[in-house]
Image (cartoon, rainbow, N blue to C red):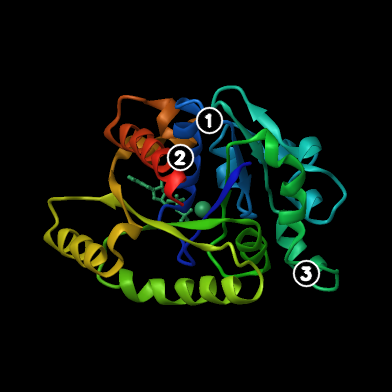
């Protein structure tokens, strides 16, 4: 059975997509069968996995509206070694179109139930909002991976997300929990980042992943080549950190 994780944080630009595509590539590298679901109409995870969002015949939009299955809509990215259920601007319309439909928050979950045996991991790249799209992700998932930068307001920013996760857990998806906080774009030379990192650990304990993702320009350059950093430049510090993170996650699974 696949482990299904949302990569979520309601803030934009915190590193969700970078984490989702590089974790997908890292997991594939250590032998896991991975499906990456792009739930953001910006389609950055799709493009960053070498799949052209403008050329998608079927996308996660069709899956949410039940006009296609995941088997039909997912594409295997040869270069990246994982499957991609892509997204593009069309997905922004789903928000409105889903409003009047039955079980509108369960659409992704129902679709994933069918392909459960075909993957070891399903990663869902969420948009920077707590919208119906994110809700579909949270209803489908076993847990949430929260990428965060160690900045001054980092802890405050978490409150909304933690409350949403609690509500979804109580009302819609009793499986849901926070899997862990992933420190990203970390610069150890900045004292404030070290301090916030320590605060995070004392506040959230073992919910903070051991692996730290450094700020690394190769990770930022990779998307313009349509690749995760892990594939674009495997020797880069950031890429190595994501493969290490994939290993950490695989080791954590039995204790979840
Ligand atoms: P989100 O999906 O949360 O909006 P992104 O993953 O798109 O965030 O990242 C925002 C920006 O930060 C992008 O330009 C990305 O390339 C860059 N970035 C993300 N992680 C790193 C990192 N570890 N080192 C350097 N740049 C990064
Ligand atoms: Mg993103």
- In the image, residue 112 sits, relative to residue 236, either above or below, namely below
Q: Nearer the viewer, residue 156 or 209?
A: 209
Ligand 1 under 8 Å from disc 1 Cβ: no
Residue marked by disc 2: 23
Q: Is residue 63 left or right of residue 1?
A: right
N-terminal label among 1 and 2: 2
* Inter-mark Cα distance, 2 to 3: 31 Å
Q: Looking at the image, which residue is at 77% across and 54% down?
A: 110
Under circle 3, the secondary element is helix
Mark 2 neighbour class, 10 Å CA radius: few under 14, some 14 to 19, many 20 or more: many
Viewer-side residue, 22 vs 42: 22
Is disc 3's CB within 8 Å of ligand 2?
Answer: no
Q: Which mark is residue 96?
A: 3
User: Which residue sits furthest top?
Assistant: 78
Q: Which residue is mark 1?
A: 32
Give the residue at x 56% y 35%.
Answer: 49
The location of residue 190, given as percent across then percent down, is: 14, 56
**Numbered disc in front, either 1 or 2:** 1
Examine the image and state in which quarter residue 47 appears.
top right
Q: Would you say the beta carbon of the disc 2 residue lies within 8 angstroms of ligand 1?
A: no
């Amino acid at each position: 059975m696949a482990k299904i994780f949302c990569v979520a944080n309601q803030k934009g630009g915190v590193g969700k997509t970078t984490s989702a595509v590089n974790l997908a590539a890292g997991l594939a590298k250590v032998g896991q069968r991975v499906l990456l679901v792009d739930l953001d109409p910006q389609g950055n995870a799709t493009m960053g996995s070498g799949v052209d969002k403008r050329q998608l015949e079927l996308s996660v939009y069709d899956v949410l509206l039940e006009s296609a299955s995941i088997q039909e809509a997912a594409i295997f990215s040869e270069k990246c070694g994982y499957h991609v259920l892509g997204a593009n601007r069309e997905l922004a319309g789903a928000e409105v179109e889903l409003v009047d439909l039955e079980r509108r928050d369960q659409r992704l979950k129902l679709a994933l139930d069918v392909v459960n045996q075909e993957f070891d991991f399903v990663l869902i790249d969420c948009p920077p909002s707590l919208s119906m799209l994110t809700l579909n992700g949270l209803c489908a998932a076993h847990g949430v991976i929260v990428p965060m930068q160690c900045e001054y307001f980092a802890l405050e920013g978490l409150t909304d997300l933690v409350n949403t996760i609690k509500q979804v857990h109580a009302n819609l998806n009793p499986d849901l929990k926070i899997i862990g906080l992933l420190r990203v774009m970390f610069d150890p030379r900045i004292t404030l980042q070290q301090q916030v990192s320590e605060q995070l650990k004392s506040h959230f304990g073992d919910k903070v992943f051991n692996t730290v993702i450094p700020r690394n320009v190769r990770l930022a350059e990779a998307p313009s080549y349509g690749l995760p950093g892990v594939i674009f430049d495997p020797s880069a510090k950031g890429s190595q950190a994501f493969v290490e993170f994939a290993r950490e996650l695989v080791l954590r699974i039995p204790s979840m």
